[in-house]
Image: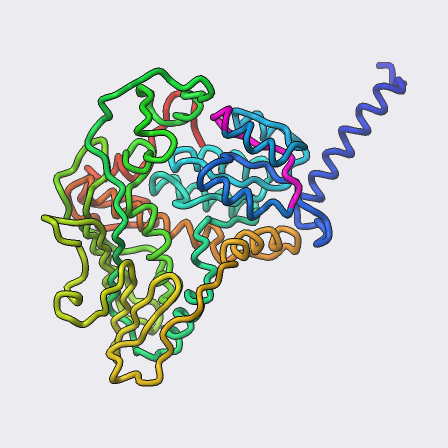
Amino acid sequence: MNTLLTRRQFLSRSSAAFAGLWLTNRSFGKISPNEKLNLGIIGTANRAAADLQYVSTENIVALCDVDADYLAAAQQKFPGAKTYRDFRKMLERKDLDAVVVGTPDHTHAVSVVAALKSGRHVYCEKPLGHTVSEARRMSEVAKKQKRVTQMGTQIHATNNYHRVVKEIQSGVIGPVREVHVWVDVVYTGDGLPAEHPPIPAGLDWDLWLGPAQRRDYSPEYVPRKWRCWWAFGGGTLSDFGCHYIDLPQWALGLRYPTSVETDGPPVNAESTPAWLIARYEYPARGESPPLKLTWYHGEKDGQKVRPPHFAEGKLPPWGNGVLFIGDKGMLLAEYFKYVLLPEKDFPAALEGSKPDHDYERKHHQEWIEAIKTGGTTSCNFDYSGALAESVLLGNAAYRSGQKVVWDPATLRAPGNPAAEKYIQHHYRSGWKI
């Protein structure tokens, strides 16, 4: 074998080796706090546009979107970024430190797991996955790859949420045995859409579907209403449950429920419910007692589905909220305020705090700073994966039509085989994680 290298061969091999060394160093927590990360963005419009805004302090070097119009609009703001339609092509780049995923739920796992396996840190919108098995897989891969991760539950960063957690953990209302969580927001459809006009010229419909089974395009799905269909989202529970159930999970140290059962309208095979009640049971945690947590959303027979405490006159007329019931009293909270109840027992109680308008930036910056310093985040995939599993398990119980008794170690629901197909994910041919 001729061991002499031409100058071109030497330069080519040296460049490749240097690039690999640079990527390795950058990928394993050796980025100076003064350096900027090289970010790839998957999804550029709607909620993803907010994510892009709050990480724009870094180098946006790659933009990916299946919609050419959205992609062009984003590139106008970041003209130095290269554009892609397929995230798999974007991840072939060697200069990406981290990736932000702001796509619909059904494409979270395929893009996130690919990014993690390629050595990139990841920020992903909520819920973490589309099914329980996806959420678990994402958290496992993040742990194995030792990547810095964050789920997009930005409300977690509000001053008010931090104050509520401090109050609950201080024991001001005593041991908490019961929690109620409710929202007025509703995502629902009415079976399959009837209208199927031509696919818009700029939309790659096949890539938008990604791992979901093939179906005809409808403007009911894209760009905003996809949460209303099981094929792409999980309705109100999987979306707002990640924001509101986050608070009791954090404050009470919850992990996986032991069971969940639901009430709701007759199950529609295609679209998510207009109202739902989901009753979770959580085991004791150390000195903390077992907990019953009930979720409510929507309207039934013209009445809002809410905890009975409203009809009993025990609560002020708030919209969305979380009610902690302890042995010594109650705490009612929402995003930006809270109050201890009954007021006669807590005369000096502070009702909430001034809304802080910087929480979204703080949530994204926490992730960026953790990458640069080798730290961690408050909503890393270990924490947020368990949260996502809980809300997704509620949907599985509803769709199966019976109670789920949960075994988190095996990801199985013994005695409820109907729930299995809603817990374990199934991918279109050519897609996998």
Against 84, is 138 above or below?
Answer: below
Residue closer to the observer: 120 or 345:
345
Residue 380 left/right relative to 218: right
Against 356, is 2 above or below?
Answer: above
Residue 323, quarter of the rendered image: bottom left
Residue closer to the observer: 88 or 319:
319
- Residue at 13% in and 49% down: 300
From the top left corner, tell me how far across and down residue 342 is, in percent.
24, 79
Q: Quadrant of the N terminus?
A: top right
From the top left corner, tell me how far across and down residue 333 is, in percent.
33, 66
Residue 58 left/right relative to 8: left
Residue 82 left/right relative to 219: right
Q: Quadrant of the C terminus?
A: top left
From the top left corner, tell me how far across and down residue 233 is, in percent.
33, 37
The question of residue 61 being in magenta is answered with yes
- Residue at 23% in and 63% down: 292
Range shown magenta: 58-69
Residue 13, quarter of the rendered image: top right
- Residue at 30% in and 78% down: 173
